[in-house]
Amino acid sequence: MAGPRDQEKETLALRMLTQALEAEGLTVEDHRAHAGLGADAMASNGHFYELKAHGGPEPTEISLTGAELRRALAERERFSLVIASYLEQGLGRPTLRIIADPLTCLTLAPTEEVKLKGLRGAQVEAVVCEWGER
């Protein structure tokens, strides 16, 4: 279960994603309270988004839960991984990296969970949005 600080970062990441998608004419529904869905948000076009929020720099790998992996496998091109970084004030420019269909472009490293590696790789096509420093 995420602690209060993690929930604050995730809420900020969801706000940033909503802002980015609204610029594309889409609305966003918050699905974080729906346990087992495998995605934190869904856009009005039926696209699913899994949020990974970080106070500091973007990590080089993340883990997916079983539900998140199942959603990514089921939806493929209608599933995006959203990595939010620099969400803590004074650490840098808040940034979103949105990676569509991450299972096809990132390296899978099976553990009890699945880690996706190569988040900052040059061959990964992603949308990156930056905001002014907090």
Image (spheres, rainbow, N blue to C red):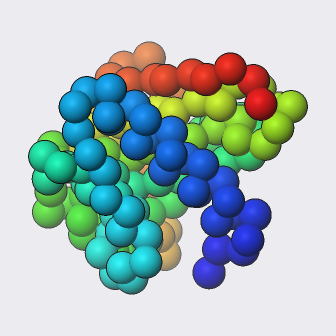
Q: Locate the C terminus and report the quarter of the image it occupies.
A: top right
Q: State whether residue 68 is above or below residue 37.
A: above
* Marker count (numbered): 0
Q: Is residue 48 left or right of residue 51?
A: left
Q: Is residue 46 left or right of residue 115?
A: left
Q: Residue at x 62, y 81 (%)?
A: 1
Q: 66 or 16: which is nearer to us?
A: 16
Q: Quadrant of residue 125?
A: top left
Q: 82 or 7: which is nearer to us?
A: 7
Q: Is residue 132 left or right of residue 12?
A: right
Q: Position of residue 10 (x, y in %)?
A: 58, 56
Q: Is residue 116 left or right of residue 5?
A: left
Q: Quadrant of residue 42?
A: bottom left
From this viewpoint, is residue 6 visible?
Answer: yes
Q: Residue at x 71, y 36 (%)?
A: 86
From this viewpoint, is residue 117 visible?
Answer: no
Q: Residue at x 40, y 31 (%)?
A: 20
Q: Residue furthest right?
A: 90
Q: Position of residue 13 (x, y in %)?
A: 55, 47
Q: Position of residue 26 (x, y in %)?
A: 23, 39
Q: Residue at x 32, y 34 (%)?
A: 22
Q: 65 or 108: which is nearer to us?
A: 65
Q: Position of residue 80 (x, y in %)?
A: 31, 45
Q: State whether residue 126 is above or below residue 26.
A: above
